[in-house]
Image (cartoon, rainbow, N blue to C red):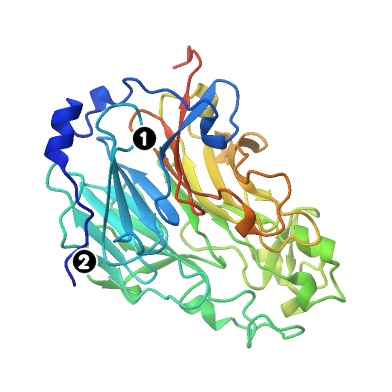
Amino acid sequence: MKARNYLPVALAAVLATAGCQPGSTDDQNAGLAADPDNGSIELPENFGALVVADSLGRARHLTVRENGDIYVAIENLDKGGGIAALRDTTGDGKADQISYFGDYSGTGIGIRDNYLYFAPDSALFRYPFKGDELLPEAAFETIAYGLTSRNQHAAKTFTFDDQGNVYINIGAPSNACQDPDRTPGTPGQDPCPILEYAGGIWRFSAGQTKQSQEDGHRYATGIRNAVALDWNSSVNTLYALQHGRDQLANFWPELYTNEESAELPAEEFFLVRDGSDFGWPYCYYDHIQNKKVLSPEYGGDGRQIARCDSAENPIMAFPGHWAPNDVLFYDGDMFPEQYKNGAFIAFHGSWNRAPLKQAGYLVAFVPFNGDQPSGDWEVFAEGFTGTDSLSSPGDAEYRPMGLAQGPDGSLYISDSQNGRIWRVIYEGKNEEN
């Protein structure tokens, strides 16, 4: 490995000027206030947001250390590294130190047991922290390698349980397991060979190094691509959201109208257990009919259930093509009680909803009671696009991508379009906590 590439950081001088310790949690909320316009986004009453940092690059997932330092996975290496490290030394919530490091770009990032875990498209690394330093040790350990990474759905995202395991999404490099892929009228391969090495979630030991994909355990299957996944410690259960398949009308115009194809299939919210099978590529969930139906590549007509009666259903469904890219179960104390143990979901926004307007550029909230939703989903944060009408995703001003919870209960949101990071705080009187 080459030496990591850092931007210059004059830590000692800045700290002397700021007069506070790096990442001090006692100073974290001193002078903290939302921006007058909430950083251009809209939030529920009594919530506010401030822009922590901007123009970081194409930001993906992010994580926050116990001392308040923020680490953001970056999709490109244009600024000197695949991870951005952010620190606020003045207590105003704004990052006044930003450094880049790492020779790989990626999506997944998280902190566990004083290590920073990071996932490029084919592996999982971890960097050790030695103290309160912003930048971890340069040398990383390889936890998992050789993870399937092909020309689509290559991003590796992950989450930890409370027993020392890490769960990694290995997306299927396919739309519906056709050969060749994405071709009109072509049947799907049966059985689909992709499910042997992708299209599911694999479990590894979070502390063991040099594990190949074959060393991992295929925990769940029949999932096209689950960029959004999180372990809900309150019920000791894994959850994920799937990116549904595309282009029903393009490839099967005799069965679907363009309007139907814009809405279908649903983006599915899964409760995932060991051995779960959610049916991709053979099945998809139709949230209008409220049932899982047989895919046209396998003889379906948009109504037939057939073999899909054995595929597991989602616990909730969302409109098609919204692209759920992160989910976070909130266990902080800052927000009102109704948010406790509920799920925030970052939707990245659609690309193939024509002739309908683009949609789904938002952060949603789903209340939970135990391991199931206790009510309908609601919009928590919106206004990211900067316009009411988009002709393509590239026209959006911002696109929600990642979510993280700060040590004080703040909610952080990353944007993949311009690299903006928001910190959402509750400004009302919270008598329930």
| Residue 203: percent from left, percent from top | 37, 62
Q: Is residue 315 visible?
A: yes
User: Which label was assigned to residue 249?
Assistant: none
287 above or below 149?
A: above
Q: What element carries label 1?
A: loop
Dot 2 or dot 1: first in sequence order is 2
**Which residue in the protein does label 2 denote?**
209
Q: Residue, x 47% and y 78% (percent of image)?
A: 150
How many numbered circles does the render carry?
2
The quadrant the C terminus occupies is top left
Q: Residue, x 17% and y 29% (percent of image)?
A: 17
Q: Nearer the viewer, residue 240 or 304?
A: 240
Q: What residue type is labelled 2?
A: Thr
245 above or below 254?
A: above
| Residue 208: percent from left, percent from top | 22, 63
Q: In this view, does 122 lie to the left or right of 4?
A: right
**Which residue in the protein does label 1 denote?**
406
Q: Which of 406 and 290 is in front in this view?
A: 406
Q: Is mark 2 on a helix, strand or loop?
A: loop
The quadrant the N terminus occupies is bottom left
